Amino acid sequence: MEATLRSKGPWTHRAAIWLFAAAQCVLVYWLLGFVVNDIGSVTGTPYGEIETRMLDPDLIAQREELTEQLAENKRQTENQEDRQRLLRDSTENSKQTMDQLLEFHRLSLEKDVEPNAAEQTALAEAEQLFLANQKQYQELNTQLVQLHEQQRDYKEQDRRLNVALEAARRPIYAEFERLESWHQMKLAAIKLAVLVPLLLVAMVLFIKKRQGSYGPMIYALGVAVAAKVTMVMHEHFPEKYFKYILILAALALVLCVLIYLLRRIAFPKPDWLLKQYREAYERFFCPICDFPIRRGPLKYVFWSRRSIKKLSFPRTESQSDEPYSCPLCSTQLFEKCDACGATRHSLLPTCAHCGQTKSPEALLQAAGADPAAR
Ligand SMILES: [Zn+2]
Ligand SMILES: [Zn+2]
């Protein structure tokens, strides 16, 4: 009876309740999301650490040495090339000087003028400088060729070392993958260790208290926690397992709803039954078998569910109000009240004369249903 008599409040109030319950659902979902994200932000063993532990230190030393050598080679090559460039300028310069002196010399000889000693010396010096530069240039060239050869050699070593390193790193990658997936499993376990107890609490509340005054809060909590658990499982479980979990959960939900609906027909709840009884009594039909209740002024009247509204009742005073049973299904429909002795409805909760109330179980018993079967 409690459910029928509970005050529902104006619709604005009820809408506000569900609106705030939805807000509670979203906020709880976010809160759980923050917790789950914080758990998920814990990182596993970094790759570098595994490599330091597993990679041959010899290979690392070789790698470092070779890198150093390549850099040194490059530096030297650049230096030599710079020097060569400067020398080329200088050689060019000395060649021009020498050419000019030679030209001067030739002109002097044509005019039959013997070049003096200073001019001779200058020419000789220019010649010497030019030759010296030339020689140095050659030397630098030789060194550069050597450096380039060395570089080729280093690059070949580098290539071989890279191949060796890649081969040596393959098991390290595998180990890293293994550790990382193990780490992710641990994170999933921690997340579920936080969420599953909450889910259990929400389920217990849902089963026990969802009909109570705080029903909307319990629905909101349940939906938020269940959604978060689903998301975490989706994130961590491989798809091939997750789809089975999801389909089984959905199947369980559908079966629960179906069973609930079927049970509701087979074993109706008191408030549901009461509605049925009320409608039957209002139209003077037996609530159990629908046979007309022909008592009092209606003793010799015929009516159907449609015609009852247009029926005019003969006004008779001082009709005796006697207990009455349905002649078809023999259910007692009117009985003597235990408290005041007047005749009352057997299948409605309260006596119209004295206000004494029957328990729902007593009502069900009066209707011939077995309360234990529910
Ligand atoms: Zn009946
Ligand atoms: Zn009474």
Image: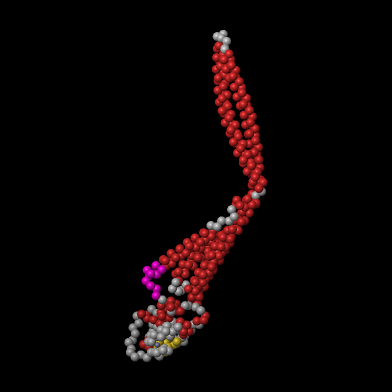
Q: Position of residue 12 (x, y in %)?
A: 37, 68
Q: Where is residue 324 in the image (x, y as percent from the top left)?
A: 42, 88
Residue visible at 63% across and 31% down? Answer: 143
In the image shown, does 123 or 140 lie closer to the viewer? 123
* Residue furthest top as drawn: 112
In the image shown, does 321 or 116 lie closer to the viewer? 116
Task: Indicate whether 55 appears above or below 183.
Answer: above
Taking 328 as reference, is 54 left or right? Answer: right
User: Is residue 133 at least partly visible in the picture?
Assistant: yes
Taking 354 as reference, is 210 left or right? Answer: right
* Residue furthest front as drawn: 118
Taking 356 as reference, is 230 left or right? Answer: right
Which SS type dominates the magenta stretch? helix
Residue visible at 58% across and 34% down? Answer: 78
Q: Does the magenta stretch include residue 172?
A: no
User: Is residue 289 at least partly visible in the picture?
Assistant: no
Q: Where is residue 358 in the image (x, y as percent from the top left)?
A: 44, 84
Q: In terms of image quadrants, where is residue 116? A: top right
Task: Indicate whether 316 appears above or below 92.
Answer: below
In the image shown, does 20 or 296 lie closer to the viewer? 20
Residue visible at 55% across and 11% down? Answer: 108
Q: In terms of image quadrants, where is residue 234? A: bottom right
- The span shown in magenta is 7-17
Residue visible at 47% across and 77% down? Answer: 269
In the image shown, does 28 or 62 lie closer to the viewer? 62
Q: Where is residue 349 in the image (x, y as percent from the top left)?
A: 42, 83
Task: Indicate whether 218 appears above or below 89.
Answer: below
Q: In which quarter of the image is ligand 2?
A: bottom left
Taking 132 as reference, is 263 left or right? Answer: left
Q: In terms of image quadrants, where is residue 275? A: bottom left
